[in-house]
Image: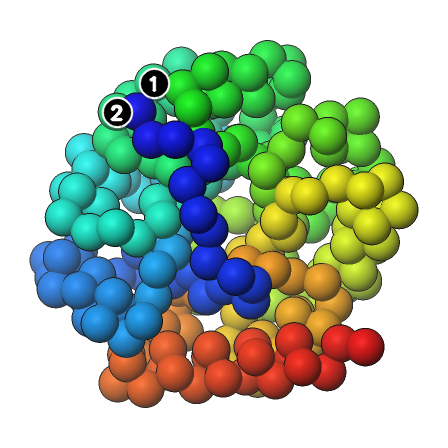
Amino acid sequence: MKPSTMALPQPPILAPSLLAADYGRVNEQVETCLSAGINWLHYDVMDGHFVPNISYGPKFVESASSDNDAFTDVHLMIENPDHYIDHFVEAGADLITVHYEATRHLHRSMQNIKKHGIRAGVAINPATSLQVIRPILAELDLVLIMSVNPGFGGQSFIPATYQRLTDMATIREEENHEFLIEVDGGINPGNIDKAVRSGADVLVAGSSVFKADDIPQRIHELRENAKKGKEMIV
């Protein structure tokens, strides 16, 4: 069991999403990311029911994460997520995020994750009000703001997300919470700085990283632009 108190990287954190990786070379590409300084990897799990696509399951997460020390961030875009939490914990998850829209008993889902000694997060879709998760914010280690409609990689960032990030950061400050704010979908070198300025701590980038001709160079570019966004925060 991984301790929930393990040290986390300091924001802004770039989290490549293995949804966009070449599955035939995934271990090689993971090593490329690690060699480029990545210490947080994002796993988008899709079931073909909650979202219109199927990705991979616990065995993939276990295979990709077992030989490295990167933080294993598992994002469950699946129905009935509580049925699978144990499997992803066994696969090596350090944090499991479930969707507000996918579970009827969100507090119970958080308890089911945290009883394993790992961190717990909640994701919300672009059309879901931030207000619906306010009653449970004190229980969370991470809030994931979707910046695309979940289900497919390579989509364009929804501009309204910037304000949603700012609003969530304001709520966090006003209520003295400590959760991280993650953004997932359409992050690229041209918008990562604004996402950071808007309040994002963890920035998930899939196609932008793994479809690049030079992955290490793209990681460097994304991280440098994210740092510039952080430096501009007053």
Kind of residue at disc 1: Asp
| Quadrant of the image occupied by residue 216 | bottom left
Residue 36 tag number? none
Q: Position of residue 79 (x, y in %)?
A: 48, 24
The answer to whether marks 2 and 1 mark residues whose Cβ atoms lie closer than 8 Å is yes
- Determine the secondary structure under disc 2: helix
Between 135 and 184, the one lying in front of the other is 135
Please report the residue visible at 71 percent of the width from the left and 62 percent of the height from the top.
199
**89 up-or-down from 190: above or below:** above
Residue located beneath label 1 in the image: 86
Kind of residue at disc 2: Glu
Between 28 and 170, the one lying in front of the other is 170
Q: Is residue 167 left or right of residue 47?
A: right
Is residue 93 shown to the viewer in this render? yes
| Quadrant of the image occupied by residue 66 | top left
Please report the residue visible at 27 percent of the width from the left and 34 percent of the height from the top.
92
Q: Across the whole image, how many numbered discs are drawn on residues?
A: 2
**Quick one: quadrant of the N terminus?**
top left
| Image colouring | rainbow
Please report the residue visible at 46 percent of the width from the left and 58 percent of the height from the top.
9
Between 208 and 141, the one lying in front of the other is 141
Q: Is residue 95 left or right of residue 212?
A: right
Q: Disc 2 and disc 1: Cα gap in Å?
A: 6 Å
Mark 2 residue crowding within 10 angstroms, few (<14) / some (14–19) / many (20+) = some
Residue located beneath label 2 in the image: 90
Is residue 155 shown to the viewer in this render? no
Q: Position of residue 47 (x, y in %)?
A: 38, 32
**227 up-or-down from 57: above or below:** below
**229 up-or-down from 178: above or below:** below
Q: Position of residue 42 (x, y in %)?
A: 39, 51
